[in-house]
Image (spheres, helix red, strand yellow):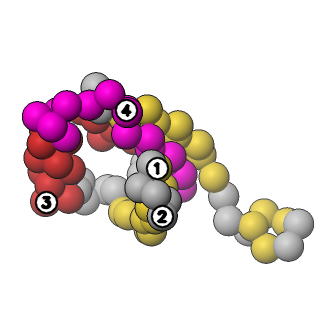
Amino acid sequence: MLFLLTNRTRPDLTAAQYGELATLAKQFYASIPADVSLRAEWAAIDQSHNYTLLEAPDIETVRRLQAPFERFTETVIVPVTAISGWTAS
C-alpha cells in the first residue's frame, strides 16, 4: 500500500531535541525495513514540513516506523493511490 506522510517539526524543540531528531532520522535511513520502500520525499522551501511517499504492507507498519518521532513531529498519515485523470490506477 502507498502512504503519504506529512510531517511538521514541532516549533518548540530545543537544540538538544533537534539533535535527538537528527539521530533518529539517521538511524531510520540506515535501517529501512525490507518490506518498506521510500518512493519520494520533499521538503517545504521554508523547511516547516516534509512529505514522504512510501510503500508499506499496512498502516500499522507505518505507525510503528513513525512512533519514535512523535515527540518531535506532528504527522498525518494518509493511504493513497495513484490516479490518472479522474480514474484510480
- Residue 38 is at least partly visible in this image: yes
Give the labeled residue for mark 4.
10
Between label 3 and label 4, give the one nearer the viewer: 4
Say which label, 3 or 4, has the lower sequence index. Answer: 4
Q: CA distance from mark 2 to mark 4?
A: 17 Å
Callout 4 crowding tier (Cα within 10 Å): few <14, some 14–19, many ≥20: some
Give the labeled residue for mark 2.
45
The percent coordinates of residue 10 (x first, y second) are: 37, 32
* On screen, residue 30 above or below 9: below
Q: Of 7 and 40, which appears nearest the observer?
A: 7
User: Which residue shows up at 11% across the image and 34% down it?
Assistant: 16
Q: For the C terminus, which image quadrant?
A: bottom right
Q: CA distance from mark 3 to mark 1?
A: 22 Å
SS under mark 2 = loop
Amino acid on which the number 4 mark rests in the picture:
Arg
Q: CA distance from mark 1 to mark 4?
A: 10 Å
Q: Of 8 and 69, which appears nearest the observer?
A: 8
Callout 2 crowding tier (Cα within 10 Å): few <14, some 14–19, many ≥20: few
Give the labeled residue for mark 1.
49
Q: Of 60 and 49, which appears nearest the observer?
A: 49
SS under mark 3 = helix
Give the labeled residue for mark 3.
30
Magenta stretch encompasses residue 57: no
SS under mark 4 = loop
